[in-house]
Image (cartoon, grey):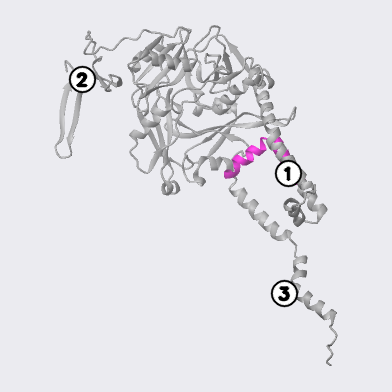
Amino acid sequence: MSTRPPSDDSDEQSSDDELTDWPPGNSDQHESSPPWIPLGIVGILAVAIGWFFRPWLHGLIYAVYTTPLLLFGIVAGSIAAWATARAGGGVETVVNAFTSNDHTITPLRVGVVVLVITAFALMPVANAVAGVTLSDQTMSQTATVERLDDVDADNPRIVTRAVADRYASNTLNRPQYRVGDTDISVVNGTPYWAAPLAPDGLFNKITKRQAGTVLVDVTTQQANVRSVDGELETGVGTIFHRNYRWELLKSQAYLVDYGDPKMVIHNNTQYIAVPYSEPTFHLTPLPHSTPQWGGVAVIDPSGSIETLSPSEATASPILDNQQLYPENLALQSVAATKYRNGILNTYTSHEDEIEIAPLPGDENDQPFFILSESGPQYVVAVEPYGNAQGLQELWTIDGQNGTFERYVPADSLFGPQRAADLVRQSAPQTDWDRFTPAEPILTVIDDREYWQVRVVPEDNSGIAYVAFVDARSGDVDSFEQTDAITQFLGGETPVETPTETDPTDTTAGAPTVIVQRVAENGTVIETMTVYDDESVEIRTPTNSTAGTENATARAPGS
């Protein structure tokens, strides 16, 4: 009979512990290693990278900065997480408190709930409160006027933005560049659609700079395009480290809202002007902020940046007659006046509530920048809330100093939508599937209000004609030639240009032949005048080998 040696319980337990702790010493090392060192290194690297690329983070940071309730929610969540870590023994406790399946109430979870409630429940209320504050500020600083300024008849706004883009692209003959976004710039007293000549394609963006500025004359129907050449050290549409916005956010004020860049030509030198707004904070009834004009940043061709206050920008000779007041701020301020009778009114009776009038046409959103007899202005047409489309008010904002004025018509006036409909009704022969009314702008001529409406092809290839709709009677006058348009704006009766079908005596230098490009349905697409010292050459392609058949016609008497 064999006997089994008694088991050694202590040896078995020791063996189990050794297997559990394999490799030896790992458990002690894990417990003793400080977790904050690698986290600290990662945090420092993240902060350094974020600081260098802070222009790319501006949108998010500025949104949080200008939304105090959201900022308070983030701070509350961070404090709750810190409190949990202090009470529970470190980062692991915080993570477990957030990811564990139990329903224990922890400070971290409370902080997250507070943040969510703040962001999704109180934010709409805070935005409405901010709208009321901005409305009160705007209404208190706005003068109500009985008449509008007459338009500058010598500098009418004829060419729309979409047509200007087409004109500029059609004349571009530099394959490495493209035409950037257009905005109106005043050069030697004449308004132009100005666009940066920016590098096109990734390789060119990396290797090239902005090469100049393209100018399209606003005051004539013809494609009057010219360019100002010269590279800009800091420009538009370039690689990030040579981009105007990168430089502004790296070297100038960061917690501001920079608007769209505007090309300015002064003494044949190119500048980039960037109006900007900055927030003003309010504590009651809920923490919120409202924007106000902060100034204008001016960048010269060498890349040097000068930040001007509103008063300094107004006095600058470089910025004379330019758009200095931020156009987004102008539109936002007018739109906020829907809260003039309080928040509840916008959900109940809608008394005197307004809305920005929607407009037909491509890329023709308000505000419109025009030159009036008193200087450059933004104009914003508003209509009553709801389905009503009459003109409720017309707001004008001085483009140089930001002075607001509000015109409330004493009589009932047609709104811009109705004006566009009247233009369509006045020309039933026009194929309105191929043409569209665009940019209805209320214009005062001899103290009478007219909607000045441009009629453009769907492809924005030009201006077919300009119609003036009497805002009271609905009468429509249409003109195809720039001279007739300026005469009407000046209060004169336009003189019809003599044509072959209506011969009259002509004076020296007057046009004697009118050439029209006409669609199949008889619609005049484009008109050109031919003078007595000019001729018209018509080229008709036949095929690739036969070349062309040419016909030359000369004006009578030439």
What label sits on residue 112 in the rendered view? Answer: 1
Is 524 on the left or on the right of 213, as rendered? left
Is 379 on the left or on the right of 350, as rendered? left
| Amino acid identity at mark 1 | Val
Say if the magenta span includes residue 61: yes
Indicate the quadrant containing the C terminus: top left, top right, bottom left or bottom right. top left
Please determine whether, in this image, residue 170 is positioned above or below residue 426: below
| Amino acid identity at mark 3 | Pro
Residue named by callout 2: 533
First in sequence, mark 3 or 1: give its number.
Answer: 3
Residue named by callout 3: 23
Say if the magenta span includes residue 122: no
Where's residue 231, x and y in %?
42, 41
Bounds of the magenta span? 55-79
Where's residue 191, x and y in %?
43, 24
Is 347 on the left or on the right of 267, as rendered? right
Please determine whether, in this image, residue 2 is positioned above or below residue 67: below
